[in-house]
Amino acid sequence: MKEYDFYIVPTPIGNLKDITLRAIEVLKSVDIIACEDMRVTQKLLNHFDIKTKCISYHKFNEKERVNLFLGILKKGQKIALVSDAGTPLFCDPGAVIVEELKKHNFSVTALAGANAAATFLSQVPRDGEDFVFIGFLPKSKSQIEEILKKYKTTDIVFYDSPNRILNTLEIIEECRPNSICAVGRELTKVFEEVVIDKTENVIEYFKTNTLKGEIAASVLREKISNNEADIDEKISVLKAKGYKAKDISIILSSLYDFNKNDIYKKCLN
């Protein structure tokens, strides 16, 4: 098997059995394991009797560690990068060091393995294959609303914390009434649960059911008829010409079989 200088190694997101045989092999064979929290990683290493030395590597010391890692690799030693759970560089640190390694012509490879977004989406029936992954949503309500409006016709996938998810869902319900949401918690663990329903129903469900662990969630795309999509395009054209919302609603409702108030609301959005 070909050897590399630097390995990106996914770790289980809950169930320790989800680690791959290759991941165990690599973690045993490298000289150093770079990890977010050594206490978390050590539990995994102890479980699989892996004795490799660990060095902390997290979002607060990414740039500081670059020269250290370059020095280790120049000596001919190998490094594996892991996050606390899941795939590094996927909402986790790693981008800084990988960019530097490629600049210095060190070989980098990524192993296949556990990923919360992929595990979650595999349980959610969707109308299309495309989706946009946001990572953790911004905290600002206006920023979340901007994302919801921008990706109306695409499934939006994001991570959230149990402390924030209800507030996030309430923003979604307010901005996108009648939307369908999917929320997954405790993925791969004993109490795994994926709830798919109208957003208002998901909110009510989790108000009476305890939320623990990291959350993977999705707002499913809005279904827009050809007629409605055509109207949206015409609104955009008229807006570009400088027409106001009131004028646009009068013009389009006069020319097409569409409610004037609905067009006006669309213009404002």
Image (spheres, rainbow, N blue to C red):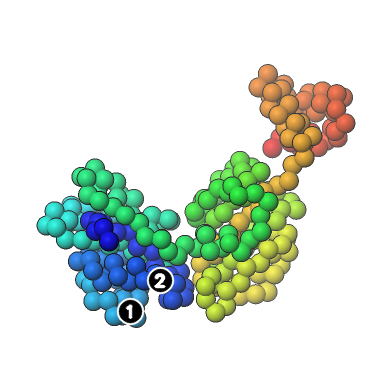
- Dividing the image into 4 quarters, which one contains the C terminus? top right
Q: Does 55 appear above or below 150?
A: below
What x and y, as percent, mark residue 89?
38, 55
The part of the image, by quadrant, that contains residue 165 is bottom right
Q: Residue at x 62, y 68 (%)?
A: 194
Q: Residue at x 24, y 58 (%)?
A: 3
Residue 13 appears left or right of 239:
left
User: Is residue 188 visible from the viewing direction of this image?
Assistant: yes
The disc label shown at residue 19, or none? 2
Q: Does 195 appear above or below 43?
A: above
Q: Amino acid at mark 2?
A: Ile
Q: How many marks?
A: 2
What x and y, as percent, mark residue 210?
61, 75
Q: Amino acid at mark 1?
A: Phe
What x and y, as percent, mark residue 182?
64, 61
In the rendered image, which residue does mark 1 sit on?
Answer: 48
Residues packed near mark 2 inside 10 Å, few (<14), some (14 to 19) or many (20 plus): many
Q: Residue at x 30, y 70 (%)?
A: 25
The disc label shown at residue 150, or none? none
The part of the image, by quadrant, that contains residue 46 is bottom left
Near-viewer residue (173 or 100): 100
Residue at the extreme left of the image, as rendered: 75
Residue at the extreme top of the image, as rendered: 241
What x and y, as percent, mark residue 160?
53, 61
Mark 2–mark 1 contact, CB under 8 Å? yes
- Dividing the image into 4 quarters, which one contains the N terminus? bottom left
Residue 211 appears left or right of 260:
left
